[in-house]
Amino acid sequence: MAQKTIKLTLIKSTAGRLETHKACVRGLGLRRMHHSVDVIDTPENRGMINKVHYMLKVEEK
């Protein structure tokens, strides 16, 4: 059975943001603006997404 994934795109810059928010963005694998990644839908990833949701575009797959 394939695991459910979420597509994330960084739509706002991390410049001037809290260090914990920058760490969450890096932890999700995002490097620069308009960079997209697919992450596995886990509680840990959901927590990081919820923390920085205002900087992300989230698409369920």
Image (cartoon, grey):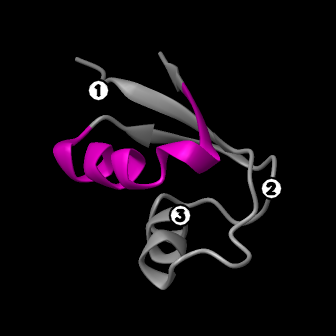
First of labels 1, 2 by sequence position: 1
Instruction: Give amino acid for label 2.
Output: Met
Image position of 41 (left or right of 32): left
Identify the residue under disc 1.
3
Which residue is under mark 2?
33
Mark 1 residue element: loop
Q: Residue at x 70, y 66 (%)?
A: 31
Rendered image quadrant of residue 42? top left
**Marks 1 & 2, CB-CB < 8 Å contact:** no
Q: Quadrant of the N terminus?
A: top left
Which residue is rendered at x = 62% and y = 49% of the image? 55
Specify start and end residues of the magenta stretch as a single range.
42-58
Identify which residue is drawn at 60% across, 74% down.
17
Residue drawn 80% across and 55% down? 33
Q: Residues within 10 Å of mark 2 (few under 14, many from 20)?
A: some
Q: Is residue 46 above or below residue 28?
A: above
CA–CA distance between discs 1 and 2?
26 Å
The percent coordinates of residue 7 (x first, y second) are 56, 31
Determine whether 57 is above or below 39 in the image: above
